[in-house]
Image (spheres, helix red, strand yellow):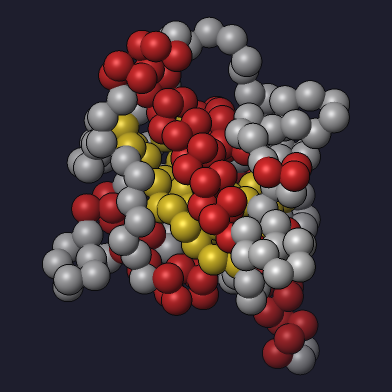
Amino acid sequence: MKKIGLIALVGLIILAVAAIALPGNSKMDASGVVKLPAPRTDGGISVEKALSERRSIRSFKNESLTIDEISQLLWAAQGVTDDKGHRTSPSAMASYPLEIYLLAGNITGLPAGVYHYSPEGHNVSTVALGDKIPELFGTSMNGKADWRASAPAIFIVTGVFERVNKVPGQDLSRFVHVEAGTASENLLLEVVSLGLGATYTAGFDANKTRECLGLVSGQDPIAVIPVGRK
């Protein structure tokens, strides 16, 4: 058997085993797509209470998150809210330049790996299997231990800048950063509603992050948000 064929076979076996490990409310198909549990749109706490209780949490318990919590957090950041395709955060010119990625380390019902979120289908597609959190955040930029490595899940907000830079002679890149801020705040408030902990971080190795996520040229990481139980 040729090497490429063997690699493909091994990949399919890994995906099949991962699918068996998933609970009944989520399923990974042969292409590595996981349908997430439906997000809830009521319950939780008030916006005012979430704003009042939001704090930057930089240490987490050694406990897993659930796929239901992951589903809710992804939806809060970029989920679709109506049949017209509107999302939870506003977008200039309805360009939707953001893409959300998940580094799954310790999530019940979801194999460790790198995932890309699709708002339209409310699912995640597999970029790579295996826990990449220690690899990407084993040490901080100053060479010390990085507290983010203890997070069971890390959300990464990226921007595809060409989606907004459509007006000749104008650089509208700032719109992408503004939108990344609104999406990140949505996620952080949902974190509070779920009784979890997180903080927004912007200090990271951009090149290593691009490589880990498999980003194409013109797509850059903007925010890294570790989430765990406090």
Quadrant, the N terminus: bottom right
Q: Which residue lies furthest to the right in this view?
A: 83
Q: Which residue lies furthest to the left in this view?
A: 144
At 58% from the left edge and 60% from the top edge, which residue is drawn?
A: 173
Q: In this view, does 80 lie to the left or right of 193?
A: right
Q: Considering depth in this image, is 4 or 99 the residue closer to the camera?
A: 99
- On screen, 23 above or below 144? above
At 53% from the left edge and 39% from the top edge, which residue is drawn?
A: 183
- On screen, 32 above or below 153? below
At 76% from the left edge and 62% from the top edge, which residue is drawn?
A: 166
- Residue 128 in view: no
- Residue 91 in view: yes
Locate residue 32, reporting x and y percent.
Answer: 70, 55
Q: Which residue lies furthest to the front in this view?
A: 169
Q: Which quadrant of the view contains residue 199?
A: top left
Q: In this view, does 55 lie to the left or right of 92?
A: left
Locate residue 81, reporting x and y percent.
Answer: 72, 25
Locate residue 147, reporting x and y percent.
Answer: 22, 53
- On screen, 193 above or below 120? above
Quadrant, the C terminus: top left
Q: How many marks?
A: 0
Q: Considering depth in this image, is 130 or 135 the residue closer to the camera?
A: 135
At 62% from the left edge and 59% from the top edge, which residue is drawn?
A: 172
Locate residue 212, reporting x and y percent.
Answer: 50, 70
Q: Considering depth in this image, is 211 or 129 the residue closer to the camera?
A: 211
